[in-house]
Amino acid sequence: MNIFYEESGQFKLAHIVQKNDTTYQVDTQFGKRTKIKTNNVFLEFDGDMAQFMQQAEAHRDDIDTDLLWEVCGDAELSAEDIAIDYFGGKPSKSQLAGTYLALYAAPAYFYKKAKGIFKAAPEETLKQALAAIERKKQQEAQMAAWSESLQAGQLPEAIAADIKTILYAPDKQTLTYKAFQHACEQSKKNPLQLAQHIGAVTSIPQYLQDGFEFEYFKKGTGFPDMPVPANPLNLPINTTIKAFSIDDAETTEVDDALSVQHLENGHTRIGIHIAAPSIAIQADDAMEKNIFQRLSTVYFPGNKITMLPENWVQAFSLDEGKTVPALSIYFDVDEAWQVTSQETVLEQVDIQTNLRIQNIEPLFNHEQGTDLTHDDQEAFAHHHDMVYLLQLAIELQKQRNKYDPTRAKQYDYSIVLNDDDTVAISTRERGSPIDTLVSEMMILANSTWAKMLHENEYAGIFRVQPAGKVRFSTQSESHIGMGVEHYAWCTSPLRRATDYFNQRQLLSIILPEQFTARFAMQSSDVFALMRDFDTTYGAYADFQRKMESYWSLVYIQQQDIRHLKATVLKEDLVRIEGLPLMGRAIGIPVCMPRSRAWLNITGIQLPQQHISLNFNKFIHSPEDEVQPV
């Protein structure tokens, strides 16, 4: 004798070895001896098990499910009663087994109420269930079609519409994601590889930038139409100065300019002139909302995403040959390099020259151009002014106890993407004469304006470092890294929301009849702006580093570099020399921090911006500077 039983939703057969009230000891079709609970057994039969199952399945396939459902009616019936009604008499055991198979195969039609007892689903419920089953079939067919298209290198319209969500923030319940994931599995490609295969991603830089924009620019990087309002203030034009800026050649948002006037009393008046977009922005207007949403310009090799639209940048950037509004701060400096007075004014300034660092640095560096006397001929416009400002900058550093000519050199890097797809990386020393000049003038302006906000008890967003790390604060505290009592970012209002806000607050101090403070002291809005800026600015910087790392790796590949010099920062963490790149190296012996070493390149993974490095040798002497073989 044999049994027909159910296990884990499947019907099976076994030969009875021994039977008692609660269990059967059986040999399965595959020869395994096991115990089956009596409650799981639906019927006993004799004869060949394989033949019996074939007959049961044949009966199941012949059963009309809709007719079987009608036979059940509204009552709860046993499978045997249902089989009697359906077959028109007492069913054979194979017919009864086939009925069980049919009932279990149609859960939308029949509800299991107890062992062997079923009830037909209500008509309306059945219609809804069948409609859902049909929808699921259609969805599965659609997903299969999409998957086939993806594997063939085609991009279905629905997948194209969802591709960024699929790649960067997948909703695993959507049909498009499931189809894309199925295509990945079938083609043995990861999502990036499949996206490249179908043309949705044309390059890794595009993939990285799209992911960044998807997270931080969900409405896109473009701007709505926001005209620049006419200047209603009728600001006076300062005709006594010749202002000039100093920026990289790629800079289009010129925030700051400088001027130098030699006074009759032997003193010198220096001017620091900052672009003033805030004069044309009203509280909560479209432009301010844009600034508080974007919070900063995003920089990365080969491109940038500006905080302000192009028409606003053109209107307020301190571009050569233009007369533009500026928030200017003037300092009178005596012969002993002491600042004797300062004044902040809102005015219009004639910008005489935009100096570009790449053009003037060969003529103004540690080796030449910084000891020019007043009688010497200038090598470029404002050469004499820059010599004076550099001398003042050094004196200001000394006054802040921050002058250290023996300080270890640090470098900034500029990555240029050439038209022939090659990468060029240039190095500029941090603390060079130009860098010292510009940074000291900005520190002077930022610290003075931060003090003005603090003393007038106006809300501001400050950069503070009373101890430990530098952080943002709505309360002014000392900045030990700068050596100043007050510090705030105020000099880049075209590029940073903090600077726009602080500038607006400064305007309300110097021109209270025309400007009101944007937020009051201790306002929750100030805390929210500070928090949002801090988080977003950090994310933008992380993206810039990611892109710089990517292009650095491309540069290494293009130059076929096999070994790199690096400085060991901590354990296996290293900073690569000559590139804006950090990594981890295997096998570095225990050493002092800041030790230098040669590393072997063992692999590069561009999509992950990862470089595999192995320790080669330390650099202790000039002989060690020679690249390993």
Image: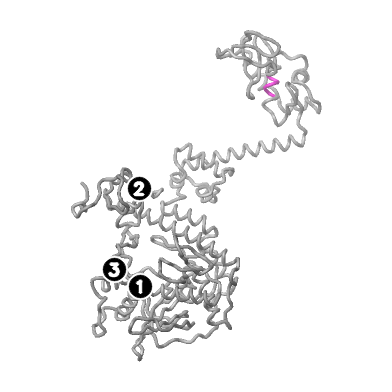
Q: Which residues are magenta?
A: 98-102
Front in this rendered view, residue 597 or 482: 482
Percent of width and height locating residue 380:
28, 78
Q: Are marks 2 and 1 in contact (CB under 8 Å)?
A: no
Is 457 situated left or right of 432 in this image?
right
User: Residue most toward the left?
Assistant: 623
- The answer to which of marks 3 and 1 sits earlier in the sequence is 1
First in residue order: circle 3 vs circle 2: 3
Amino acid type at image mark 2:
Glu
Q: Secondary structure at mark 2?
A: loop
Question: Label 3: which residue?
Answer: 405
Residue hosting label 1: 397
Tag 1 or tag 2, which sits nearer the N-term?
A: 1
Q: Whole-Å distance between the Cαs marked 3 and 2?
A: 29 Å
Residue at image mark 2: 571
Label 2, label 1: how far apart the Cα atoms are: 34 Å
- The correct choice, above or below, for 441 with respect to 629 in the image is below
Q: Quadrant where the N terminus lies? A: top right
Three-letter amino acid code at the position of disc 3: Pro
In the image: residue 308, left or right of residue 41: left
The spot of residue 546 in percent (x, y) is 41, 54
Query: Closer to the camera, 615 or 3?
Result: 615
Q: Disc number at residue 367? A: none
| Residue type at the position of mark 1 | Gln
Most common secondary structure along the magenta stretch: helix
Above-or-below relation of 45 to 81: above
